[in-house]
Image: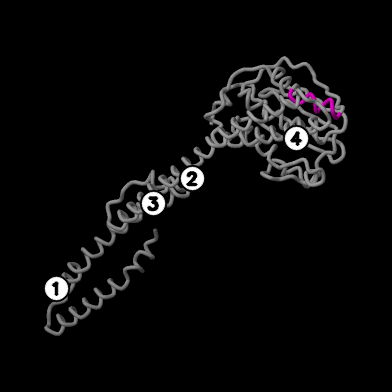
């Protein structure tokens, strides 16, 4: 708050007082009043006025300067009403009351939409669990009546099941911090579950699997890691030619799982956007195998789990995905 601007806003009132004093001084001069009396009148007139203006300016300056400093320092600007102190002048109190009322209504609206989001999430979870039952029943019936037609239907049902899983994990991703449990588990066992789930696809496409022995344990939520690995391996299966390799590498602070395929690769202009929501890229448009959600959800969950997820690729040569686990579970619990 600048003094010049403060005085400018009160220029009319000051000008009126000066004009009235000049008239009074002129009248006193006409009636031969001594100059010392005029000085006393001036001091008694403008002394209290200037003093009150000075004190008022200091109160407002301290309040607004602190307000602006807090505003600039905050990352979440909407938290400003939570940290300001109530001022002791009228204009500031009006502003303070407005900000507090606005803040209260904002929190009420946020709560309303959070409740709506929670209800929607609960509905999606319930729907997913309900729809899994007819899918599982259908798969069982087709298993008992195998032929070329049911084989094709089984493949489509498995795709549907995969998309249903995506919907479930996407719904849960908004509150992953409440849903996951960090614990120690075997990475080898987790990968084996995912590979077993995709065994038919490996056989059908005649893909060679190179899996090194992994005796490492990692800290995370096994359920969520299985989903992430499943999405990555499904992508590798869809776009690889002959071989998929999985191996680990250790460094000082982390364990890195490498998933490498020898497939069609990703165009350089697309590589920076593969984790964007709904992005399919040239490969997705050309082969029509992508919804653009799988890797987006993987990245979303990896961030929630405090894991690293990176991708490197060369067009026509293959793709490498790296899932990075911190060696200490303390890192995972920090947020």
State which mark lies toward you, 1 or 4.
4
Q: Quadrant of the N terminus?
A: bottom left
What is the magenta range? 197-205
- The reply to whether callout 4 and callout 3 are in contact (CB within 8 Å) is no
In the orientation shown, which residue stands out farthest toward the bottom? 30
Which numbered disc covers residue 37?
A: 1
Q: Secondary structure at mark 1?
A: helix
Mark earlier in primary sequence (4, 2): 2
Q: Residues within 10 Å of mark 3 (few under 14, many from 20)?
A: some
Residue located beneath label 3 in the image: 102
Of residue 167 and residue 141, the one placed in the foreground of this image is: 141
Disc 4 marks which residue? Answer: 156
Q: Residue 320, how many percent across, how many down?
A: 78, 32
Numbered circle sitting on residue 76: 2
Local crowd size for mark 2, using a 10 Å CA cut-off: few (<14), some (14–19), many (≥20): few
**Which numbered disc, 4 or 3, marks the residue closer to the eye?**
4
Query: Disc 2 on helix, strand or loop?
Result: loop
Q: Could you give the CA–CA distance between mark 4 and mark 3, rounded to whole angstroms?
A: 51 Å
- Asked if 23 appears above or below 296 in the picture, the reply is below
Q: Residues within 10 Å of mark 4 (few under 14, many from 20)?
A: few
């Amino acid at each position: 708050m600048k003094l010049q601007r403060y005085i400018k806003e009160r220029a009319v009132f000051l000008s009126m007082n000066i004009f009235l004093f000049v008239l009074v001084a002129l009248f006193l001069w006409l009636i031969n009043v001594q100059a010392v009396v005029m000085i006393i009148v001036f001091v008694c007139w403008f002394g209290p006025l200037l003093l009150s203006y000075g004190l008022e300016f200091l109160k407002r300056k301290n309040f607004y300067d602190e307000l602006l400093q807090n505003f600039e320092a905050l990352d979440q600007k909407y938290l400003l009403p939570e940290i300001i102190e109530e001022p002791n002048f009228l204009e500031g109190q009006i502003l303070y009351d407005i900000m507090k009322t606005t803040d209260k209504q904002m929190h009420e609206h946020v709560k309303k939409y959070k409740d709506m989001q929670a209800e929607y999430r609960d509905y999606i979870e319930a729907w997913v669990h309900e729809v899994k039952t007819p899918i599982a029943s259908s798969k069982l019936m087709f298993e008992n009546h195998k032929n070329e037609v049911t084989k094709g239907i089984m493949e489509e049902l498995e795709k549907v099941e995969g998309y249903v899983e995506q919907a479930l994990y996407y719904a849960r991703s908004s509150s992953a911090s409440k849903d996951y449990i960090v614990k120690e588990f075997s990475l080898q066992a987790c990968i084996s579950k995912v590979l077993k789930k995709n065994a038919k696809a490996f056989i059908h496409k005649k893909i060679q699997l190179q899996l090194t022995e992994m005796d490492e344990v990692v800290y995370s939520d096994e359920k969520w890691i299985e989903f992430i690995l499943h999405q990555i391996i499904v992508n590798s299966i869809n776009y690889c030619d002959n071989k998929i390799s999985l191996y680990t590498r250790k460094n000082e602070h982390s364990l890195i799982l490498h998933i490498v395929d020898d497939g069609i690769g990703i165009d350089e202009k697309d590589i920076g956007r593969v984790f964007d929501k709904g992005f399919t890229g040239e490969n997705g448009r050309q082969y029509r195998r992508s919804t653009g959600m799988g890797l987006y959800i993987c990245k979303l969950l990896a961030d929630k789990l405090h894991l690293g997820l990176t991708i490197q690729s060369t067009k026509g040569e293959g793709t490498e995905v790296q899932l990075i686990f911190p060696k200490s579970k303390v890192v995972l619990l920090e947020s």
